[in-house]
Amino acid sequence: MIGSLLWRLREAKDVLIGKKKAVSKIKTTFQKKLSPENLSNYTIDDQELKSFLNSTSIEFLFCEFGKERVNAGGSAFDGRNRLEPSLSTIRQFFPNAKFTVYSDFDLEIEGVDLKKVESPIPEKDHPRYLYRTADYFKFKSLLESEADFRCVVDSDMFVVSSHIYRLVYLTKIFGFCAPYNPRNLLKRDMEISLDTKQILDESGGFGHSYNQSPMTLWKDAENGKKFFDACCNLMIKEPSRASLVMWKAAKATGFSPYLLPAEFCVCGEDVGIGNEVILHVGHPSVAEFYNIKI
């Protein structure tokens, strides 16, 4: 509750000082209230798609650290449903997938494998320590998975379309993927970030800024493995916001993820874009616009 209030105050301040634009009210096409409780498994009629998915091992990964915390959108995490609504909304499309959560506490959820780990990230007193830790294990989990298709997601995502299957194809084609960031420019992302760092290389921050959910990796994508391995090393040596770590890794390796469009991670700036696949409902404005009950 307090986290949501603080988030709303920060958003209002950013609008007032010109860092963000107020989002005009567009009527949502999601008239029925959606929640993890009223979902049912999706039936695949396309036999070619069904055959492809049945022949592909699939694993979804979560990284949850700290028993009590608030996400960047201002929503508090409920320990009883720590992976919701992501877990339930993914399961309706991938009922046979493997699910694994990396955590520093005993997070017991039915049907989800727990991988309890210790963080290698320094500066344990830093206010963004848990976020840096979670981002480190997002990169690490993709490398450690043995599935053909590996996908790491935040727990506050809501899958609303069967076009989620396109993500598997895109990953097989391009090897590894990451979503666009509505702030787009890395320089701007760092200027308004809660984990800001100076960008000291020749780009001046005029490169692209990535989001981190969903991120994917295909089993034999060696360039992707080199990229995410570099992300892990950089997060330990130079801990910071994940988007800056990813920029540095791309610069160091010469490899960067295929950029997923906004439809795969609809944030507050993107509401009403159409063709939505995954909603980032941890942002209250997204949940409100799309009539999502969490």
Image (spheres, grey):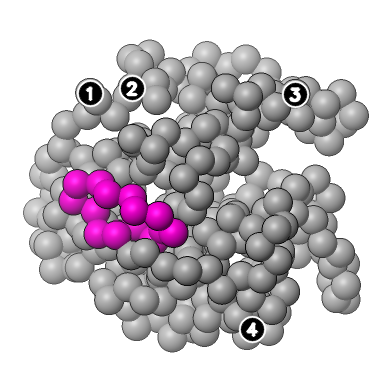
Give the quarter of the figure containing the C terminus: top left
Between circles 1 and 3, the one closer to the viewer is 3
Residue occupying image coordinates x 27% and y 39% = 88
In magenta, the rendered stretch is: 100-114
The vertical placement of 15 against 184, above or below, is: above
Contact? badges 2 and 4 (CB < 8 Å): no
Name the secondary structure under disc 3.
helix
Mark identifier at residue 9 = 3
Image x and y of residue 222, in percent:
43, 86
Q: CA distance from mark 4 to mark 1?
A: 45 Å
- For the residue marked with disc 3, what is the amino acid? Leu
Mark identifier at residue 38 = 1
- For the residue marked with disc 1, what is the amino acid? Asn
Disc 2: CA contacts within 10 A as few (<14), some (14-19) or many (>=20): some
Image x and y of residue 39, in percent:
22, 29
Residue occupying image coordinates x 81% and y 31% = 14
Residue occupying image coordinates x 54% and y 45% = 262
Q: CA distance from mark 2 to mark 1?
A: 7 Å
- For the residue marked with disc 4, what is the amino acid? Gly
Q: Which of pointers 1 and 3 lies earlier in the amino acid sequence? A: 3
Q: CA distance from mark 1 to mark 3?
A: 32 Å
Between circles 2 and 4, the one closer to the viewer is 2
- For the residue marked with disc 2, what is the amino acid? Leu
Question: Foreground: 171 or 112?
Answer: 112
Residue on which disc 4 sits: 254
Residue on which disc 2 sits: 34
